[in-house]
Image: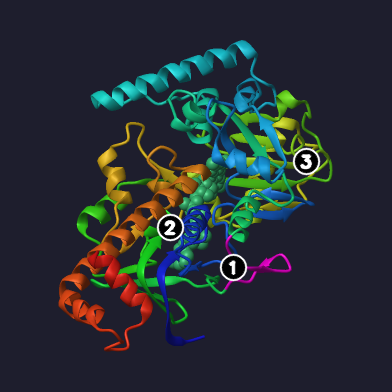
């Protein structure tokens, strides 16, 4: 519905994912309560999103708390602990010993170990080549392609020192809780937004509001949404994904400067898709060391990486297969029925033709979702810190937040969390500086007038007490 009367606030936050909600919480805790959070979808949480499927809660977005068990505590692990979120330890390094040939046999452990060592060696070489500018050689055999996929598309962790694992430890825990991973964002939001009957009812949270334009002047930002709502704020925090920034969903006036648009377009986006399949009964092994398994196909990433949900939800009879990038885009464009047919073909090659047909399938579409346009940011291994700095830097009164602005933990949930903290901190500093600047100007202009006022025994003009107080503070 058209609402031409602008809603006014000090800070407008675009996006209610973990980054936007963390930023709002920090503002509230620092006395800035006059904010509005505008979210395009019908719920908060962003890329933390569960859905009920096959009788359990499955995670369409982030599933793991990555980086646990080290010297420092991952803040998400701490939040999960406090909320009693149910999690399961995951060890997918076992997957390399469960690689299926297309004739249904598992590759012998020795062959798999040798292929794995070769892949790690070639990944290290690839890193060296990236530094020296040489073109690396690509793996050719199906088993090598499967391991390459596991190392680079599924894990991203084996050969590079990733800060998450260095700082927080190298264990990972899968969230397996009916409330979903998103519960952590809800719990955080409910600590500073008003609720009624367990629902967030705070008028400062506006769901189903798609921001389309952001117009800034010297004194503020005017934001318009798709259905005609107008918000007027002194500052804005923009926490949408890098994919949304690269798309034309939001237009800026004046346009963003070139250093900013170039930096935004230089960030790669990973598309990562978990396809869920429900079966009438289990036909795959249930042992803990068989939770993850791979299929060696001549096309890299073709239904390669599989996970059984038995560890997380015993008796659920659900399998998850992970696809990435071009394969994700390809299956997003086809019908779910076609994806099911392809997945069944692969499962029959591994487990035989007599396995039962899947009775349900769930295919998330992160690439085609115009409020995401991908799954997470992907920086080159040797991150150019200038690039990151430019992606993060504010433009006038618009502050940029989100996992893609986290210099150490981009791509992760805790990256989104830290970015929200950093952005609100930077904004609060800026607000303080602006107040100090205003006070100085007012004091310069009003000093003779105030001196006269204070010298009078009674009130000369009717000046509100809080203003008088602020003016005297500025002068003294
Ligand atoms: C499939 C998948 C698997 C993942 N696996 C893991 C994992 O196992 N572990 C891990 O740590 N991380 C994982 N991640 C990454 C993690 O989910 C993200 O890094 C993190 O959730 C990002 O939070 P954010 O607040 O930066 O962005 P988001 O959660 O994307 O929040 C941005 C919000 O902005 C909203 N928005 C967009 N456009 C507009 C607009 N025009 N107007 C208003 N609102 C708008 C969106 O709807 C969204 O709610 C995964 C992500 C995906 C998609």
The figure's colour scheme reads rainbow
Residue 455 is at least partly visible in this image: yes
The circle drawn on residue 42 is: 1
Percent from the top left, x then y, of residue 127? 34, 24
Measure the C-alpha gap from mark 3 to mark 1: 27 Å
Nearest the eye: 392 or 200: 200
> 417 or 213: which is nearer to us?
417
Residue found at the very far front of the displayed protein = 457
The residue depicted at 53 percent of the width and 37 percent of the height is 301
Spatial CA distance of label 3 from label 2 is 33 Å
Q: In the rendered view, would you say 174 is above or below 401?
A: above
Residue 389 occupies quadrant: top left
Q: Quadrant of the C terminus?
A: bottom left
Number of numbered callouts drawn: 3
Label 1 sits on a secondary structure element that is loop
- Residue that numbered label 2 is attached to: 239
């Amino acid at each position: 519905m058209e609402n031409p009367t602008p809603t006014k606030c000090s800070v407008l936050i675009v996006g209610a994912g973990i980054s936007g909600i963390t930023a709002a919480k920090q503002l509230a805790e620092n006395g800035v309560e006059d904010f509005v959070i505008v979210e395009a979808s019908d719920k908060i949480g962003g890329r933390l999103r569960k859905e009920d499927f096959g009788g359990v809660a499955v995670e369409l977005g982030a599933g793991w708390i990555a980086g646990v068990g080290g010297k420092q505590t991952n803040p998400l692990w701490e939040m999960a602990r406090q909320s009693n979120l149910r999690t399961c330890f995951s060890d997918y390094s076992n997957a390399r010993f469960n690689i299926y040939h297309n004739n249904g046999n598992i590759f012998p452990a020795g062959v798999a170990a040798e292929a794995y060592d070769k892949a790690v060696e070639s990944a290290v070489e690839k890193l060296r080549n990236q530094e020296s500018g040489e073109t690396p050689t690509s793996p050719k055999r199906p088993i090598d392609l499967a391991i390459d996929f596991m190392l680079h598309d599924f894990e991203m962790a084996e050969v590079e020192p990733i800060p998450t694992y260095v700082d927080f430890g190298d264990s990972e825990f899968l969230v397996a809780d009916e409330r979903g991973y998103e519960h952590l964002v809800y719990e955080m939001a409910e600590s500073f937004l008003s609720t009624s009957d367990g629902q967030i009812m705070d008028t400062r949270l506006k769901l189903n509001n798609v921001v389309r334009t952001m117009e800034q002047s010297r004194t503020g930002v005017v934001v318009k949404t798709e259905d005609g709502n107008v918000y007027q704020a002194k500052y804005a925090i923009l926490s949408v994904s890098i994919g949304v920034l690269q798309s034309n969903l939001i237009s800026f006036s004046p346009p963003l400067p070139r250093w900013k648009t170039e930096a935004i377009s230089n960030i790669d986006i990973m598309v990562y898709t978990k396809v869920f399949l429900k079966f009438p009964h289990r036909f795959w092994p249930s042992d803990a060391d068989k939770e993850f398994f791979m299929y060696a196909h001549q096309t890299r990433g073709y239904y390669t990486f599989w996970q059984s949900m038995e560890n997380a939800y015993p008796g659920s009879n659900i399998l998850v297969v992970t696809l990435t990038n071009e394969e994700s885009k390809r299956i997003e464009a086809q019908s779910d029925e076609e994806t099911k047919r392809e997945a069944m073909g692969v499962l029959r090659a591994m487990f035989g033709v007599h396995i039962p047909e899947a009775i349900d399938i769930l295919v998330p579409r992160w690439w085609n979702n115009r409020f995401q346009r991908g799954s997470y940011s992907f920086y080159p291994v040797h991150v150019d810190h200038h690039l990151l700095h430019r992606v993060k830097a504010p433009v006038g009164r618009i502050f940029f937040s989100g996992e893609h602005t986290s210099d150490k933990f981009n791509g992760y949930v805790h990256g989104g969390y830290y970015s929200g903290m950093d952005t609100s901190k930077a904004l609060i500093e800026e607000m303080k500086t602006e107040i100090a600047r205003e006070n100085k100007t007012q004091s310069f202009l009003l000093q003779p007038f105030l001196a006269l006022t204070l010298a009078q025994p009674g009130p000369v003009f009717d000046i509100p007490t809080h203003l008088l107080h602020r003016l005297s503070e500025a002068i003294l």
